[in-house]
Amino acid sequence: MYDYYLLFDSQGVLVTRLLPGGNIPENATLVDYDLWARTMAETDGVWKLNADGSITKHDFPPPPPPTPEEIRIANESVQADLLAQASQIMAPILVSLQLGDATDEETVSARTWQEYYRALKLVDVSSIAPEWPVTPTS
């Protein structure tokens, strides 16, 4: 029979599992094979050494909220993508307007897309939940 060990950090969080026959630090915790194997197989949480000496699995802590800089960068990326899509859709309509052969429907569509484009530029990208304008259907 082999001895199996777990090593925890100063916060009681599992750092590593130690195999039999290796160099075992004094602060390693002796465990039975079943628990040692569970810590290998069950990686959907954090294994902790509790104050009473028991070892239990806990849920991962939630991720930290995004920083204002991360929010701004993510929203600027969305904004840039939406502006590029709007520009691609507007380009042929604007050519028709410049050539003077745009239909009434194209004229209305161009105005709608230009209003949308302007509204996109005004979105507060520092907000965690920006109010994006509704994409035109025409």
Image: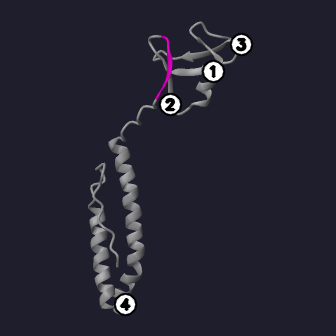
As drawn, the label of residue 2 is 3
Sequence-wise first label, 2 or 4: 2
- Residue 42: x and y in percent read 57, 30
Res 32 → quadrant: top right
As drawn, the label of residue 45 is 2
Question: Which residue in the rendered view is the most extreme toward the top?
Answer: 26
For the point 45% across and 17% down, which residue is it? Answer: 11
Q: Amino acid at mark 1?
A: Asp
Q: Which residue is mark 4?
A: 99
State left or right for residue 57 relative to residue 4: left
As drawn, the label of residue 92 is none
CA neighbours of label 4 inside 10 A, class few (<14), some (14 to 19), many (20+)? few
Res 43 → quadrant: top right
- Tag 3 and tag 1, C-beta contact below 8 Å: no
Q: Amino acid at mark 4?
A: Leu
Sequence-wise first label, 1 or 4: 1
Q: CA distance from mark 3 to mark 4?
A: 85 Å
- Residue 129: x and y in percent read 30, 52
Given this view, does label 1 or label 2 mark the residue nearer the observer?
1
On whether residue 35 falls in the magenta region, the answer is no
Relative to 128, does residue 115 appear above or below in the rendering? Answer: below
Q: Amino acid at mark 2?
A: Gly
On whether residue 57 falls in the magenta region, the answer is yes
For the point 30% across and 67% down, which residue is it? Answer: 134
Q: Which residue is mark 1?
A: 34
